[in-house]
Amino acid sequence: MTAENVLRALDAVSAGRAEDAVLSVRDLSVRFRLRGGRTVEAVSDADFDLGAGECLALVGESGCGKSVLASALLGLLPGNAETSGTALLADPDGAAQTDLIAADEKTLARTVRGRRVGLVPQSPAAHLTPVRTVRSQLEETVRALTGTSRRARRKAAEDAAERAAFPAGHLDRYPHELSGGLAQRAATALALIGDARLLLADEPTTGLDRDLVDRTVDELRRHADDGRALLLITHDLAAAARIADRVAVMYAGRIVEIAPAHRFFGPAGPRHPYARGLLDALPDRAFTPIPGMPPELSALPEGCAFAPRCPLATELCSNRPEFTANLACHHPEHPRA
Ligand code: SF4
């Protein structure tokens, strides 16, 4: 068996998670209709599964559609968005699935957001209400989710704080009295309080120093290790390398490669030229930026959107490559030795 075939087989094993997936996304597309008839193809044909205990890192440059994808999963897109495809969320008892894309607002608000899907937000300080203590915000969330007694709410709030490593002695503080790290933990506690099986962490390390980034993502990893599925949306490849099991690379609204993290960050490397470029741009690697800029999502070229920046582009690339075997490229790179 050639090295390439071995990698393909390993990728297939790694991707064979559909049956026990907590989240199964198929052909998910999001388009925004703008004034004047313009359209923005923010997400095109996203396909991936995410299993319990797994962390999938969705990486790519800012504006590539990662956060739009997360908003689509939570039903939080603006009114001018058009969606297609499916995102099946498994039921805790395994009996039924909810299609997050087809579900109405009432279903999402009452049974999904906070209960079955927890969001770890990008700016925890902005996510917390400034005039209420952390304890009161946690208890209010428990009340909204479960309607339990005051005593039970207090215990549930303290349990969630403990799971998020938020110190009990700080529960009666206001958000402005917390450090960045503690605010992040308070927001994580809010995301965990409904005991959601799926956690969406949307750029959870923005604005944090490296030490705090490491601590934050390690804590998120711990929640995945407790049996939750974690979708980590980030442009921070070091954070992804630290905790992800698999990496999905997004470019111009499309997922162009999904690879096991050990291969992606290891000696073999990714196979899509854009994914290689992202890694080669890191200061601790070749420190060579990818030439050019990503295309506007409102003016995507025909064919492969990466072609104007790709060193391997040929005439064939004027046809859009299909996403097959976890890769969308006509001339994927060979694994590095
Ligand atoms: S399809 Fe062609 S242009 Fe696009 S990434 Fe692959 S080689 Fe490059």
Image: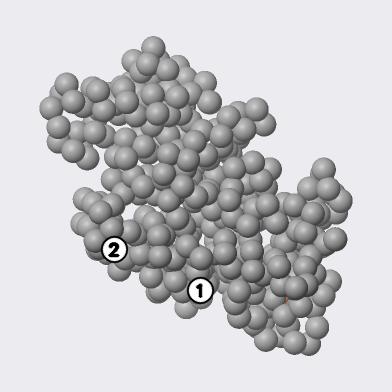
Which disc is residue 97 wearing? 2
Is 137 on the left or on the right of 86, as rendered? left
Q: Observer-nearest residue: 27 or 308? A: 27
Q: Quadrant of the C terminus?
A: bottom right
Q: Mark 1 or mark 2: name the one nearer the start of the chain.
A: 1
Is 11 on the left or on the right of 271, as rendered? left
Residue drawn at x 67%, y 86% as measured from the top left: 319
The location of residue 291, given as percent across then percent down, is 82, 62
Residue drawn at x 13%, y 27% as measured from the top left: 149
- Which residue, given by chain and number where applicable, does mark 1 sit on? 45
Q: Observer-nearest residue: 149 or 133? A: 149
Kindly report which numbered mark, 1 or 2, lies closer to the viewer in this rendering: 2
Q: Secondary structure at mark 2?
A: strand
Instruction: Tell me the crowding category of disc 1: few under 14, some 14 to 19, or many 20 or more residues within 10 angstroms, Cα based.
Output: some
Q: Is ligand 1 less than 8 Å from the beta carbon at label 2? A: no
| Number of disc labels | 2
Task: Farthest residue to the top: give it.
Answer: 169
Q: Is residue 36 above or below residue 233?
A: below
Q: Amino acid at mark 1?
A: Asp
Q: CA distance from mark 1 to mark 2?
A: 20 Å
- Which corner quadrant of the image does residue 227 belong to? top left
Which disc is residue 253 wearing? none
Q: Quadrant of the N terminus?
A: bottom right
Residue 80 visible in the picture: no
Q: Is residue 79 above or below residue 133?
A: below
Q: Amino acid at mark 2?
A: Gln
The location of residue 119, given as percent across then percent down, is 40, 44
Is 132 on the left or on the right of 231, as rendered? left
